[in-house]
Image: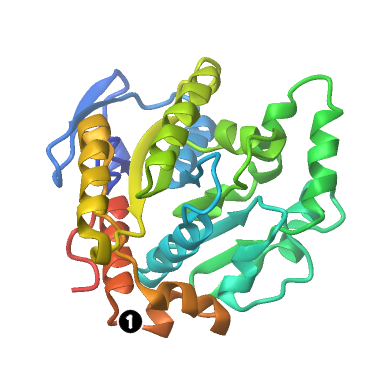
């Protein structure tokens, strides 16, 4: 039996026979976090709970373009896959750039799965070892119209589509479009953890504040949604003072959620031209080092890749 720590997300293997039927408090041997666990009396329900605990669903989102959402989603997903985790990358953007960045051309993807034009196994595309892709693309425009026409439960359309899939993976990482549309709202109702990439520009901080206000409306109906990570992108050492000033502002506002910045690096933008992740194109570059650090942060495994 495997239970996941609610703090560091380390998987704890326990003998189910040693756990009493009444609620107990467990302590994570990795981070020391104490959390309550109650064994279900229904074996089927217990299996469902374990499946839900196993899969971490992380959305990469901010209602502003040019902050590195897709780059972050792809390299985070690829990094987790390299670390041995089973990962599903879901692209909910009509531009479909995740497939381009990985150098693959899936015959279908998320849109065809949501409209039931393709079965699950036909829509899922294995892009790398341990890494599967549900591709985005222009067809998602029709999906957005389909969601808008629903009278009830429109915000759960994506969750219903992925309900039978996500339990297969350790991580489901979802890339979103820059705007605030029906599909982005669906993503926010599906995920449990939110990773927000921000460029080190003053306008991005303003956009971040507006985005968090909108999230408040979602959290009223989805209390399990947690803003876990804020990732500063494009840390440019050529204009060090400007970058550090904005980074200090972010630290003062979101210190407990702030990750180490991703430094500006030409190879990060060059890698997609060759259909490669940063680890494949320039594994020794600063950008690769920074994304490895992000993977360590998200997985709670500080010694990965060492």
Q: How many callouts does the rendering have?
A: 1
Q: Secondary structure at mark 1?
A: loop
Residue at numbered disc 1: 283
| 110, above or below 8, in the image | below
Q: Residue at x 30, y 35 (%)?
A: 6
Q: Residue at x 40, y 47 (%)?
A: 198
Residue 117: x percent and y percent?
Answer: 87, 55
Few, some or many residues within 10 Å of mark 1 (<14, 14–19, 20+)? some
Residue 85: x percent and y percent?
Answer: 40, 63
Identify which residue, 26 or 154, lies in the foreground. 154
Residue 160: x percent and y percent?
Answer: 69, 37
Residue 33: x percent and y percent?
Answer: 17, 34
Whether residue 1 is visible here, answered yes or no, is no
Q: Is residue 256 left or right of residue 181?
A: left
| 151, above or below 300, in the image | above
Which quadrant, please, contains the N terminus?
top left
Instruction: State the residue lying farthest toward the top.
Output: 220
């Amino acid at each position: 039996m495997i239970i996941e720590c609610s703090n560091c997300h380390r998987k704890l293997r326990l003998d189910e026979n040693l756990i009493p039927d009444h609620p107990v408090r467990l302590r994570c041997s990795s981070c020391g976090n104490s959390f309550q666990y109650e064994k279900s009396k229904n074996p089927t329900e217990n299996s469902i709970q374990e499946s839900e605990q196993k899969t971490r669903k992380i959305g990469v989102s901010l209602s502003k373009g040019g902050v590195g959402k897709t780059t972050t989603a792809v390299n985070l997903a690829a990094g987790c896959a390299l670390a041995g985790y089973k990962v599903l990358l879901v692209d909910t953007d009509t531009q479909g750039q995740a497939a381009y960045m990985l150098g693959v051309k899936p015959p279908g993807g998320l849109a065809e799965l949501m409209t039931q034009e393709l079965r699950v196994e036909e829509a899922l595309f294995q892009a790398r070892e341990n890494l599967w892709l549900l591709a985005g693309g222009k067809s998602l425009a029709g999906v957005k119209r389909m969601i808008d026409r629903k009278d009830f439960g429109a915000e759960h359309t994506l969750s219903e589509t992925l309900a039978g899939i996500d339990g297969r993976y350790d991580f489901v990482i979802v890339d979103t479009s820059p705007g605030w549309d029906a599909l982005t709202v669906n993503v926010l109702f599906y995920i449990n953890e939110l990773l927000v990439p921000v460029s080190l520009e003053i306008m991005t901080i303003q956009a971040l504040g507006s985005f968090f206000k909108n999230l408040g409306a979602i959290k009223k109906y989805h209390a399990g949604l947690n803003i876990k990570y804020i990732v500063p992108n494009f840390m440019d050492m050529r204009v060090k003072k400007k970058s550090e000033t904005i980074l200090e502002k972010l630290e003062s506002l979101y210190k407990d959620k702030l990750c180490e910045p991703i430094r500006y690096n030409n190879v990060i933008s060059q890698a997609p031209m060759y259909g490669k992740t940063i680890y494949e194109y320039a594994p020794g570059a600063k950008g690769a080092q920074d994304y490895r650090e992000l993977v360590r942060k998200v997985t709670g495994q500080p010694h990965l890749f060492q």
